[in-house]
Image (spheres, rainbow, N blue to C red):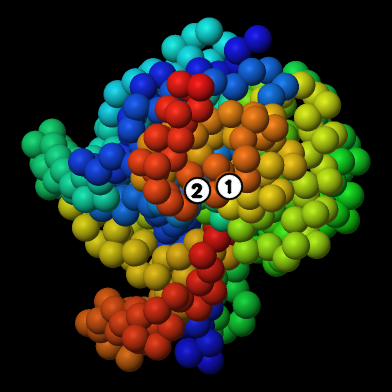
Amino acid sequence: MTWINSIMQGVLLGGLFAMSAVGLSLAFGVLRVVNLAHGDLMTLAAYLSYITMKYSGMSTWYSLLIVVPGMAILGYIVQRVLLQKALKMGELAPLMVTFGIAIIIPNSLMQIFSSNVQQLPVGALATSSIQLNNQISLGTFPILTLLMSVVLIAAIQQYLARTKMGRYMRAAADDSEVLRLMGVDHRKVYGYAMGIAFATLALAGILFGMRQGGVSPFDGQITVLFAFETVIIGGLGSLWGTLLGGIVLGVAQTIAGQISPEIPLLVGNLVFLAVLAFRPNGLMGKQALK
Amino acid sequence: MTLFNASKLTAGYGDLKAISEINLTVSQGELLALVGANGAGKTTFLKTTAGSISPMSGSIFYKGDDIIGLPDFKRTQLGISLVPEGRRLFQSLSVEENLLVGAAPNRKGPWNLKSVYDLLPLVANLKGRNSARLSGGEQQAVAIGRALMSNPDLLLLDEVSLGLAPIVVDQIYSALPDIRKQGLGIILVEQDLKRTIGVADRIACFLEGHLILEGKPADLTHQQITDAYFGHSISSFSENQEDMEAH
């Protein structure tokens, strides 16, 4: 029964991993940009949530309503002002830009807030759980996180499938040069895609901080690793593959944690390596963005 | 009325010139066919016109305005639409979604989903199918439909018949008169000389990046065109031209 509990906890954790990876997958799928600052931007969003909470007095949950749209706008601006110019300079330039952002964010946060953990309280949900039997108890917050992840992925998929801008994003993922020849301003499409990517990473960053009880400046270095592993395990370009990748990584980590509390990260990395070795395109890898 | 005018247009890739000092015009409703062997610079000319390639020098006027500094997507918004070599459909989109992306410039005109389906019944029957699962001929028909959806005034068709069965090419060419009824200018790049001579108002022959022959099909002999096409005795060809002019 203990193992079943571990698996179920892993599935719930996987929801959070998937949420953190969706933006990474979208940015790569549409723009072909590997965002090395993904984890640090998650951390930045968590700090913005903390600041909003501190100065407005609202709860962490309500801060989502301000920080997530704010990060979406920031994503659009970063794309149009920084990354768009870098994209013209070749494949390496955007990578270097995101690498630069990944250095600036945590060090700036360190200067402003010190290395102390800043609290992101979950509220009443922190101790709330659903008792399935004597040995299995599922936290309400992790369940909510998984549900939010599923809804988020379904919503993005519907957006890509049913809206004009979503169609342009899928077309850009296929052939951005021809998309421009169809009269579509690709810069706008890229900006919207990055806006969505930033919004999803902001949501994931805040929920990550809430799950851990708070956020510290260099948290992004580990969350970006989870996000990359999730995307690779699930398969680049597949949104539902991202959910599967998150669940596989989450289950691997919680089962490993059951064996020894020191090996979850190691086992997660080994699963990632195994997928790279035997299924390099990931479990549900596709060329197209779906 | 002159729709398009390229003047001393030179373009290429890096330091390599693919076309040099090209002067060409297209009038409204006119079909200009570009012929020439592989590597003659026909596709480069179309790409430079569409804005995919920045020219090294020269100018391009479209409806009287210099468009040389405009990016590709703005040129399409102004009414220049390219059917690229190799079709290049969006593989993860359905046929109808490909057509809808083509309508992005939102220009007014005769072409919409219904009129494109009426023109190309083959495409209508495939509208729900993923474009990656189409034959070459089906893809070409969709690519033409997609370009028409932007309601262009200048349509650039690159290698329409390349790699397609003759019967499929016949079907595609049978749609050309209906497209031309709308009065748009067309620049057609085609390898099939016989077919080109049959549909073109004017023919321009490229050889190694240079425009070496231009005229109406009725004014050119088949031998002149094939000589220019294959680059046979260009000097003697030029001499013949000079002789004819002298007489």
- Reply above or below: B132 against B29: below
For image coordinates 16% across by 43% down, the residue present is A100
Residue A254: x and y in percent read: 39, 80
Mark yes or no: residue B141 visible. Answer: yes
Residue A105: x and y in percent read: 19, 40
For image coordinates 55% across by 49% down, the residue present is B226
Q: Who is closer to the viewer here, B166 or B218?
A: B218
The amino acid type of the residue labelled 2 equals Asp
Q: Is mark 1 on a helix, strand or loop?
A: helix
Mark yes or no: residue A155 visible. Answer: no
- Reply above or below: A281 against B222: below
Q: Who is closer to the viewer here, B169 or A162?
A: B169
- Reply above or below: A249 against B50: below
Say if labels 1 and 2 share a chain.
Answer: yes
Q: In which quarter of the image is the N terminus of chain B?
A: top right
Q: How many C-alpha atoms fall within 10 Å of the one at disc 1: few (<14), some, or many (≥20)?
A: few
Residue B158: x and y in percent read: 58, 45
Q: Distance between the residues labelled 1 and 2?
A: 6 Å
With B215 as the anchor, is A226 left or right in this view?
left
For image coordinates 29% across by 24% down, the residue present is B57
For image coordinates 35% across by 80% down, the residue present is A276
- The reply to whether dot 1 and dot 2 touch (C-beta < 8 Å) is yes
Q: How many C-alpha atoms fall within 10 Å of the one at disc 2: few (<14), some, or many (≥20)?
A: some
State the residue position of label 2: B227
* Chain hosting mark 1: B
* Chain hosting mark 2: B
State the residue position of label 1: B223
The amino acid type of the residue labelled 1 equals Gln
